[in-house]
Image (cartoon, grey):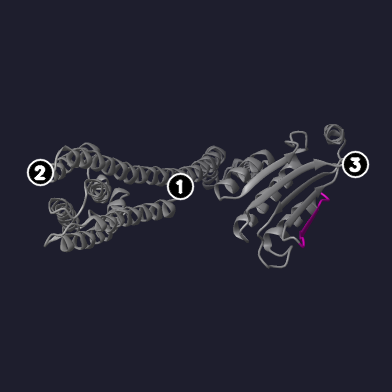
Amino acid sequence: MELYSRCSLHVSFGLFTLGGLTMLVTGLGTVRQHPYALVLTPLTMLLLLCQGGLAIVLNTQALDHYLGLRPTPSRRLTVGVTAVSAATLSCTAASQAVGALSTVWVSETVMFSMALLAGPFSLLMPIRRTAWVCVLAVVAVSVMVEATGRGVAPLAGSLFMGTVGCLSFACSSRGCGWVLSVLRELEQARDVQARLAVAEERLRFGRDLHDVLGRNLSVIALKSELAVQLARRQRPEAVEQMIEVQRIARESQGEVREVVRGYRTADLHTELVGALSVLRAAGVDCAVHGDDASALPAEAQSVLAWVVREGTTNVLRHGEAQHCAIRLRARPDGAAVLTMENDGVDDRPPGKGNGLDGLRERLTAVDGTLTAERRSDGVFRLTAQVPRPASPDEQGPYRDYAAGRAG
């Protein structure tokens, strides 16, 4: 978006410069025999060309300053653009005064020159100040044109066309800078949101560990101190206290395992939603088809969630995918099948990598299978299959899920 906006502004400056040169060249056909006629028009064209080049440079630096990427442009460049613009407009008025240009060509040239001047200054000054500067510039040019003494038409033409030029480029440049600043703020907000999510997860994990270990470690410390005092007094109760310390330590070890296991458990619905968000943010057209997997057993959901997570990572890391499709369905025999397809894969052999090997180990633990293949049309397909659970308490809902999907 930023590249498109900058290129559009540069092209617009070039077109306005070319338009002004075209007006001057066309006006040469109406030149009257005057000693200075054939000198003023080429000089005006040269000044307009210099104004366009300097305006592009100033506008680029002004846009960087507006976005906070660089300090204020140098004073020499700003004064140079202003001086060249004033010289261009003065030569335009002088060309009309000697009859080198008609009223129509003068008004058009004033519009293009004022536009090139208003664009960069709209990014360097507040909106109100920019409006006042543009008004004063248009009035000054109109007065200068009126001083040629050629009637009301040149005055009205310069006023109207100068106002149009200032408004068009001031709004265009300032609007472009505003849009880019909003996009940059959104990008920064997304990065902050991601960092906050990571920090929140770390706090949650730390809070869980504190809740689990805090009380138990305090009890272990107190009972150990009591056991030391009893041992020094050669009391037999010291052995019972140490046995109690050993029991609490083992319980704490088991509780820590449960916390870590819960922390590492993947939720299928969360992973599907996260895959959609991440892939679409990366410019990949992603869609999920099939059931929401709410009727799947917890173990099957966890394993398939890891498949979605690893598959999403592979889509982002390997190749330049444009489309990705995730399908979840149940076969008539009760097996759950998850398929991920994406294009733009690289030339690595399919099915290789530590991530896929880890997924195979997880699926093997539940008697599942994982296959990875690259089709001839350049589409990479990752298929995970989880069989019907063997425990009686899970066969019921899983069979209902399969029957509902088959119907």
Q: Are marks 1 and 2 in contact (CB under 8 Å)?
A: no
Q: Which range is magenta? A: 366-376
Residue 167 found in image quarter? top left
Disc number at residue 164? none
- Residues packed near mark 3 inside 10 Å, few (<14), some (14 to 19) or many (20 plus): few
Mark earlier in primary sequence (3, 2): 2
Q: Amino acid at mark 3?
A: Asp
Q: Is residue 75 left or right of residue 392?
A: left
Q: Which residue is mark 1?
A: 191
Q: Residue at x 29, y 48 (%)?
A: 66
- Pick whichever, 133 or 105, lies toward us: 105
| Residue at disc 3, secondary structure | loop
Give percent across and percent down for residue 324: 67, 50
Q: Which residue is mark 3?
A: 333
| Residue at disc 2, secondary structure | loop
The Cα–Cα distance between marks 1 and 2, rounded to whole angstroms, is 62 Å
Q: Amino acid at mark 2?
A: Gly
